[in-house]
């Protein structure tokens, strides 16, 4: 039971990281209708910016400056790229941006992984549960994710900035008549969504691996969370992220084969190789299987609305 509780905590921490990564994309799509294909590339940039800043100014400065730098870059791309074409070619533009970012990362930092480590102040374990140690840094990641969720809700629901953003996106002409610069609001939203991806990169880069393939490895997962949770639904994405994180973590820890779990499969002589597949090997496939099932039985997702 203690081992299961430990796995659940790890799954929740991974799910909260997925939410932190996907929240910016959902914010951009839900408010602007822009399908930001390069979102995972900004996640990667956040990790590399933090790796570069940390030796000079420390991790805590990198935690603030890296997302800001990524957000400014995202705002620049929206202002001088997407806006010029009226968001008619967002897939082509953002795909091109993802390729350019990948090549630049490899030119500047190389093709192998970099030594971006957890800060000394956050090393060690948060608590011990019957011999299982829960890392302090994972607890910190969970806290940052929850703080980000609460901050997004507070800004959008309780502040004048959030009201102006919502008015600019739902009643554009009325917002312009009241003197608000709607194009500038859209740039702010796009830059803010990219900054959230950069924040996820800062948090995940030292917990996992910072290397040029990290964008490709997480890019598909972002869209799975977006589809399962419902296009543009932050609440649905939060539930989907936790579900995927816990599901993957639990299945990855299952040390048994399909044959041992489903003994009747051995009657088919043609499935011997299939029957000896470990459940842990199926963990990377589960999010995509869940996405297919959701598209089959609830196409608008967990938190989405019918069109």
Image: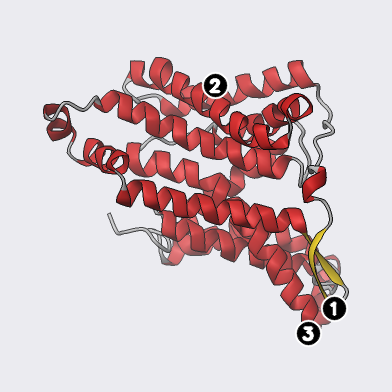
Q: Which residue is mark 1?
A: 130
Question: What is the spatial separation of the Cα atoms under label 2 and label 3, in whole angstroms?
Answer: 50 Å
The quadrant of the image that shows the C terminus is bottom left
Residue sitting at 81 percent across and 39 percent down?
Answer: 117
Residue 101 shown left or right of residue 109 in the figure: left
Q: Residues within 10 Å of mark 3 (few under 14, many from 20)?
A: few
Q: Give the Cα separation between the discs numbered 3 and 1.
A: 36 Å
Reading the image, the residue beneath label 2 is 96
* Residue that lies at the very extreme toward the right in this rendered image: 131
Q: How is the image coloured?
A: secondary structure
The earlier-in-sequence mark between 3 and 1 is 1
**SS for callout 2:** helix
Expressed as whole percent of the image width and height from the top left, the position of residue 116 reads: 80, 35
| Image point (83%, 66%), residue name | 133
> Would residue 239 be found to the left or right of residue 46 on screen?
left
Q: Mark 2 or mark 3, which has the lower sequence index?
A: 2
């Amino acid at each position: 039971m203690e081992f299961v509780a430990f796995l659940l905590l790890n799954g929740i921490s991974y799910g909260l990281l997925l939410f932190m990564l996907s929240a910016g994309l959902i914010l951009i799509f839900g408010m602007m209708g822009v399908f930001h294909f390069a979102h995972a590339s900004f996640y990667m940039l956040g990790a590399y910016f933090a790796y570069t800043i940390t030796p000079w100014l420390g991790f805590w400065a990198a935690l603030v400056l890296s997302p800001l730098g990524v957000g400014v870059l995202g705002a620049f791309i929206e202002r001088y790229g997407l806006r010029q074409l009226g968001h008619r070619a967002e897939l082509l533009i953002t795909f091109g941006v993802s390729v350019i970012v990948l090549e630049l990362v490899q030119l500047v930092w190389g093709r192998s992984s970099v030594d971006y480590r957890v800060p000394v102040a956050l090393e060690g374990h948060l608590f011990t549960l019957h011999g299982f140690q829960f890392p302090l840094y994972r607890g910190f990641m969970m806290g940052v994710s929850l703080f980000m969720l609460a901050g997004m809700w507070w800004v959008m629901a309780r502040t004048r900035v959030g009201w102006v953003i919502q008015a600019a996106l739902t009643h554009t002409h009325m917002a312009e008549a009241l003197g608000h610069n709607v194009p500038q609001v859209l740039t702010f939203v796009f830059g803010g969504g990219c900054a959230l991806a950069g924040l996820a990169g800062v948090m995940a880069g030292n917990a996992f691996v910072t290397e040029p393939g990290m964008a490709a490895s997480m890019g598909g997962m972002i869209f799975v969370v977006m589809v399962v949770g419902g296009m543009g639904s932050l609440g649905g994405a939060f539930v989907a992220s936790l579900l995927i994180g816990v599901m993957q973590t639990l299945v990855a820890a299952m040390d048994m084969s399909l044959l041992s779990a489903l003994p009747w499969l051995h009657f088919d002589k043609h499935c011997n190789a299939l029957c000896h597949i470990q459940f842990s090997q199926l963990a990377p496939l589960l999010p995509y299987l869940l996405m297919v099932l959701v598209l089959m039985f609830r196409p608008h997702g967990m938190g989405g609305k019918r069109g």
